Amino acid sequence: MSGAECMKNPPTLNSASGIGNLQEIGGLNSYVSGSIHSKLAILLISDVFGYEAPKLRKLADKVAEAGFYVVVPDFLRGDPRIPNDEKPLEVWIIDHGPDQGFEDAKPVIEALKSKGVTKIGAAGFCWGAKVVVELAKYAYIQAAVLLHPSFVDVDDMHAVKVPISILGAEIDRRSPPELVKQFEMALNAKPEVDAFVKIFPGVTHGWAVRYNDEDELAVKSAEESHQDMLGWFEKHLK
């Protein structure tokens, strides 16, 4: 379902991509899973390929089962990057900067608070990781998880104010292990901020939500990253 179609139709169950439903939250079409009565919310912020990714929605459902109200907003506003698109990422990103995602996240967070949510965690994948780290720098959220981050640098780590977990891939040109270890060193210099950094061996950038179902190692590693993410939120939000 495209963003335009979402706007034309009322929220409906979307069993093809998960057990949740589509709602507008903070002005953005969003996939929502879990009890509206939960006081604990999790934002899952997608990579450049958008919020409709089936594995991302399955992950939202898994997190919701742990008692969280989970929201996956369409920060790309119905215009995700198309796989194998001839347009270079550097061109596409001009109109889809993580800085805009950060601004768009603020009304989503306010909308959640207006529903009675008292604590919010956020996990970002690739592109979404930069949005999450910006939220963590200004304490709009209470816990952060970055999975195979892009556009994130060491200076971001120096400014983080909330507990943060970084889950990286061994094979990753955007955030190679050397850079992730620099993130860890910067966070270690901030004892007031709880931090957890882990590099997953044998996996590539995007493995947490774009793994091959036929690849046993990839599936196992993705599930391990999901458990690490969920454990971080349970530690710092419950």
Image (cartoon, rainbow, N blue to C red):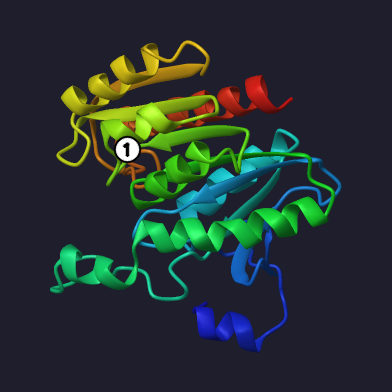
* Residue at point 14%, 39% (across, down): 173
- Expressed as whole percent of the image width and height from the top left, the position of residue 14 reads 64, 67
- How many discs mark residues in the rendered view? 1
Observer-nearest of 199 and 189: 189
Quick check: 154 above or below 80?
above
Quick check: 184 above or below 132?
above
* Residue at point 64%, 59% (across, down): 108
Secondary structure of residue under mark 1: loop
Which residue reaches farthest bottom? 8
Observer-nearest of 161 and 141: 161
Observer-nearest of 88 and 1: 88
Type of residue at label 1? Answer: His
* Residue at point 18%, 71% (across, down): 91
* Residue at point 37%, 69% (across, down): 80
The quarter in which the C terminus is drawn is top right
- Expressed as whole percent of the image width and height from the top left, the position of residue 154 reads 27, 31
Can I make out residue 138 in this image? yes
Can I make out residue 53 in this image? no
- Expressed as whole percent of the image width and height from the top left, the position of residue 140 reads 60, 43
Q: Quick check: 51 left or right of 84?
A: right
Q: Which residue is mark 1?
A: 148
- Expressed as whole percent of the image width and height from the top left, the position of residue 156 reads 35, 35
- For label 1, the crowd category at 10 Å Cα-Cα, with few meaning under 14, some 14 to 19 and many 20 or more, is many
